[in-house]
Image: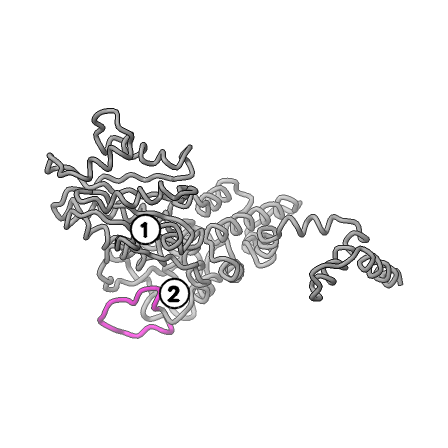
Amino acid sequence: MPSLAVSRSAEEPLTPQKRRLRSNSTAAPETPFSSPTKRKSPRRCLDSTPSSHPNFSTRNDSIEPISNSSKSPAEELSEDFSEILNWNPRDASQVSAVKEALHVSTAPPTIVCREEEQRRVFDFCRACVEKEQSGSLYVCGCPGTGKSLSMEKVSNKLIEWARDGGFDPPEVLSINCTALTSSSQIFGKIVENGYVKVKGTAAPLQHLQNLYSQKQQSSSSKMLLIIADELDYLITKDRAVLHDLFMLTTLPFSRCILIGIANAIDLADRFLPKLQSLNCKPLVVTYRAYSKDQIIRILQERLMVLPHVVFHPQALELCARKVAAASGDMRKALSVCRSAVEVLEAEVRESTNNMDSDTRENSVVKIDHMAAALSKAFRTPVIDTIQSLPQHQQIILCSAVKFFRGGKKDTIVGEVSFFCYHSTKMHRY
């Protein structure tokens, strides 16, 4: 149902009771992995009417996607920040809701900034189902780049597409290789889950090889989609398990679609050279580390379910810049934001003044709270150990570092002692 635009005169001040909703506009056509059309919260609807937005131009075509906007996510968040009611960090229910929204285990309703990667994986699986052919795909990328979350989205979309298109939906088997007691247990998992009927007392691997080497009697047998997460845990000394797993997709009557997920980009080249020689190397889809703008956008999407503003825009931007420069790990960004909320919570708890409506407006996670959380997250235990040492022991460490960084591969204790003696003497004066 289209929302109504509430008009307001230029002289009338904007109050929380008088918020303007997003005007009705033509929505862009939905792609398999585009965000579904949904009603926006009041926070996203402020200053969105055609008459009030300074950069709005009247057009008949559809709205451009967020990624093509001329403004960065940080700038868009800063524009609306001053006009939104803030939260109360003394309210335990509100704090719990914020932490839950920022928890890694909380799956977001939409997966943004990974539309292209999901489309490639979906097209590969769709082609296998349409042709009833097996295939293998390797998904790689840095930790915390949305690989596992995207595969869950793709598998659900694939089943929905198969049902709508009149195809037999494939069976989906998701395996986390870290939970296996041994690497060869993965073949038993495929058999134990009932996707493949066992006949006789043959080993699981041998049974699968025999099954996919001969034509199946039942023409209604479904395709099997195997999603093996943390694939590098299957690497053995002889690499036999990893090789045999991918070889299941090369058998003449195989109906298996294998998607392996790991962090190493060159895993297929290093540990599966035989597959490359047989011209059956898996297709590789790489997930790049998140950029600063992508991290801000994902955080905005997660915080959009909350009715109040919790983070200052500059605090979110500081977190995104630091995490993007370090690793681009979205899980680290979520952890830092949760830690920043805890820093603010501890600060409010220590305060003896009651928080009224005036002071509550300033009770958001600011740059100093985020800086404290970042310092805690990126500080290594080695630094804590060095800082806890006595002063003379720190001087010895500095002296040793100075000698070894000076180009000397080794040094004698006397040289270090001589330097430490003069360093201590100079420090006293």
Q: How is the image coloured?
A: one colour
Q: Any magenta on residue 278?
A: no
Please state the horizontal and vertical placement of residue 5, each as a whole percent of the image: 30, 62
The answer to which quarter of the image holds residue 186 is top left
Give the residue at x 52% y 40%.
92
Res 47 label: 2
Q: Earlier in the sequence, mark 1 or mark 2?
A: 2
Q: Nearer the viewer, residue 179 or 162?
A: 179
Image coordinates of residue 158 in percent, x first then y, are 22, 47
Horizontal and vertical percent position of residue 71 = 40, 69
Nearest the eye: 240 or 81 = 240
> Residue at (58%, 59%) from the top-left corner?
367
Secondary structure under tag 2 reads: loop
Q: Which residues are magenta?
A: 54-68
Circle 1 is placed at which residue position? 274
Quadrant into which the C terminus falls: bottom right
